Image (cartoon, rainbow, N blue to C red):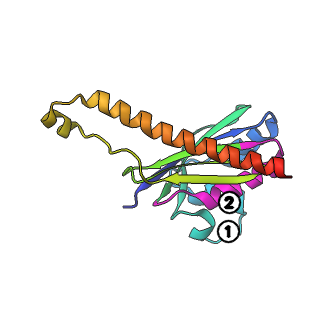
Amino acid sequence: MANHVWTRTIINSDKEEVHSKLLEWYGEIKQHHDVKGVVEPIFGKDWDYDINLIGSKWIVIEDSTLGDAPDTEINFCSAWSPPIEFMEEFTATLVAIDDTVTVEFTGDEESDDFWFAGYGSKNGFHWGEDEDGPERPFEEECEEDGTDYDELIDEFYDECWSIQSNILSMCKKKVEENDKDN
């Protein structure tokens, strides 16, 4: 089975049209594994299954809060790698609806091999990745070592969040620099 990669996405727009469109696209997805239902609104009904267009083996929606301005949240789940190509096209599709929309995302992979984040707006799209994150503590090892698992796992998640936040800040800065250059 493929390793799962989670891409937690926040779409920010004051225009109700953006959130209504996301609700229209993804509000009726009944099956957890509806790859076609996730991809078609972005690439069209004639989309031919192409991993290179998504950036991962498949992509589905795991959960969401759709339809609420100013922020809609979608947690995408993909296989093996971040769905960067999908996220870039997703952002471009939303920018075509509202040129003030922003899309930001953070993500990780279930075996803790990498953490990533990205940001997009009318000024561009940028993402980054870190493969040198912290080592996950395991409860059994902590019991053997006499260390406090709860404390160590909290520190682990804090460090992971810090990595993702730093990457996201760098991505926002890169995209904002594009705005200043234009």
Q: Quadrant of the N terminus?
A: bottom left
Q: Residue at x 70, y 41 (%)?
A: 23
Q: In the image, is 124 to the left or to the right of 147?
A: right
For the residues bearing labels 1 and 2, Cβ distance under 8 angstroms: yes
Q: Which residue is mark 1?
A: 47
Taking the magenta stretch, the answer to whether it contains residue 89 is yes
Taking the magenta stretch, the answer to whether it contains residue 65 is no
Residue 36, quarter of picture: bottom right
Which three-letter amino acid code belongs to the residue tagged 2? Glu
Q: Is residue 4 above or below residue 154?
A: below
Q: Which residue is mark 2?
A: 40
Residue extending farthest right: 182
Q: Which residues are magenta?
A: 80-102
The rendered magenta stretch, by its main secondary structure, is classed as: helix
* Element under disc 1: loop
Cα gap from disc 1 to disc 2, whole angstroms: 7 Å
